[in-house]
């Protein structure tokens, strides 16, 4: 999940820190995929993408529009986006990762029924 979050952070910060963060999830992905039984863990990448998207939704929780706050010596105003599309995208990625894990996970084999062979012990007089 952390690796997916780093991918999303690289994408969201593409013009600033994204290019410097991108090698970290790439190396982590290579290391994780090379391990045995890494297939199910790779689904955490999908769910992990939701974390930075949720953070963007949180940062814009007062939006949409111009949001002003009082600071020492005046006011500071920032333009905020609507948080709802970001929240919907985060929930979609989270639901996709969780449901994919749920449907692909290995299930235990059904128990083998025990058959009582009593024919050897019958008295056939």
Image: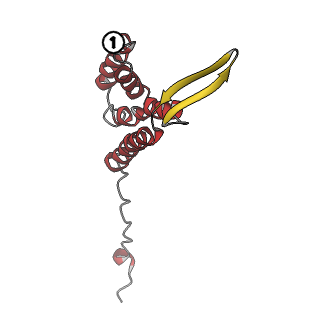
- Residue 94's x, y, as percent? 41, 41
Residue at (29%, 19%) from the top-left corner?
Answer: 30
- Residue 32's x, y, as percent? 34, 24
Where 29 falls versus 37 (above or below)?
A: above
- Residue 63's x, y, as percent? 51, 36
- Residue 6's x, y, as percent? 40, 22
Left or right, residue 78 beside residue 34 = right
**Circle count:** 1
Q: Which residue is mark 1?
A: 19
Left or right, residue 98 beside residue 64 = left
Classify the position of the C terminus by image quarter: bottom left
Q: Quadrant of residue 41?
A: top left
**Closest to the observer, 25 or 62:** 62
Outermost residue on the top side: it is 20
Classify the position of the N terminus by image quarter: top left
**Closest to the observer, 63 or 100:** 63
Q: Quadrant of residue 25?
A: top left
Q: Residues within 10 Å of mark 1 (few under 14, many from 20)?
A: few
Left or right, residue 18 beside residue 81 = left
Q: Quadrant of residue 115?
A: bottom left
Outermost residue on the bottom side: it is 125
Residue at (39%, 76%) from the top-left corner?
Answer: 121
**Closest to the observer, 77 or 120:** 77
Residue at (48%, 28%) from the top-left corner?
Answer: 79
Q: How is the image coloured?
A: secondary structure
Where 71 falls versus 102 (above or below)?
A: above
Residue at (34%, 23%) from the top-left corner?
Answer: 11
| Mark 1 residue element | helix
């Amino acid at each position: 999940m952390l690796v997916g979050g780093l991918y999303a952070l690289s994408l969201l910060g593409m013009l600033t820190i994204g290019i410097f963060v991108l090698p970290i999830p790439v190396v982590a992905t290579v290391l994780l995929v090379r391990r045995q039984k890494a297939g199910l863990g790779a689904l955490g990448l999908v769910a992990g993408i939701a974390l930075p998207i949720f953070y963007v939704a949180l940062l814009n929780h007062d939006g949409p529009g111009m949001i002003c706050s009082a600071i020492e010596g005046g006011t500071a105003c920032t333009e905020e986006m609507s948080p709802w599309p970001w929240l919907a995208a985060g929930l979609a990625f989270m639901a996709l990762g969780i449901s994919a894990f749920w449907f692909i996970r290995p299930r235990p084999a059904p128990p083998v029924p025990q058959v009582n062979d009593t024919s050897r012990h019958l008295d056939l007089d």
